[in-house]
């Protein structure tokens, strides 16, 4: 499994900022925008991940689409990966850009 993951990371550098979502002691490794959005929703706060890509985060109590539109750089850059998750207070979105 690790060998396969290393091959995937070597072939697709966009995924190099993380592995898979793995629960470890006091930490979570995040793969894509959806995983990052789930982490934000669980925390209930907007915090950027350190994945090395341009990332916008947003929040809305209205809808998932509104949370995406509230993300940094929305409409100014081309999105690569979009994730949205429902938290207790509203919708959390993460958009990763080129």
Image (tube, grey):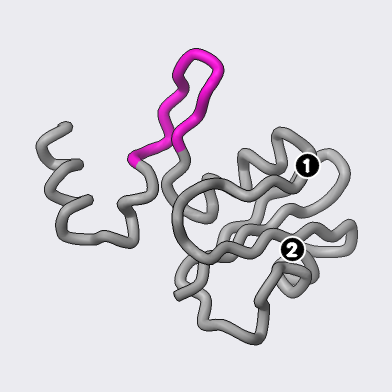
Compare residues 26 and 65 and report the one nearer the observer: 26
Q: Which mark is residue 95?
A: none
In the rendered image, the vertical position of residue 2 relative to residue 12, given as above or below: above
Q: Looking at the picture, how far across and down is residue 9, in whole percent? A: 22, 51
Q: Looking at the picture, how far across and down is residue 76, in whole percent? A: 63, 86
**Quadrant where the C terminus is found in the figure:** bottom left
Tell me the quarter of the picture where residue 45 sits.
top right
> Quick one: SS at disc 2?
helix
Residue occupying the far top of the picture: 25
State which tag comes first along the sequence, 1 or 2. Answer: 1
Front: mark 1 or 2: 1
Q: Is residue 26 magenta?
A: yes
Q: Looking at the picture, how far across and down is residue 90, in whole percent? A: 84, 50
Q: Looking at the picture, how far across and down is residue 75, in whole percent? A: 66, 85
Q: Which mark is residue 45?
A: 1
Q: Which mark is residue 64?
A: 2
Q: What residue range appears in magenta?
A: 19-29
Q: Is residue 90 magenta?
A: no
């Amino acid at each position: 499994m690790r060998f396969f993951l290393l091959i995937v990371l070597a072939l697709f550098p966009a995924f190099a900022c993380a592995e898979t979502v793995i629960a470890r002691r006091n930490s979570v490794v995040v793969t894509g925008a959806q995983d990052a959005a789930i982490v934000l929703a669980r925390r209930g706060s907007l915090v950027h991940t350190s994945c090395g890509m341009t990332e916008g985060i947003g929040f809305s109590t209205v809808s998932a689409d509104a949370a995406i539109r509230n993300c940094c750089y929305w409409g100014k850059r081309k999105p690569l990966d979009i994730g949205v998750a429902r938290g207790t207070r509203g919708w959390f979105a993460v958009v990763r850009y080129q």
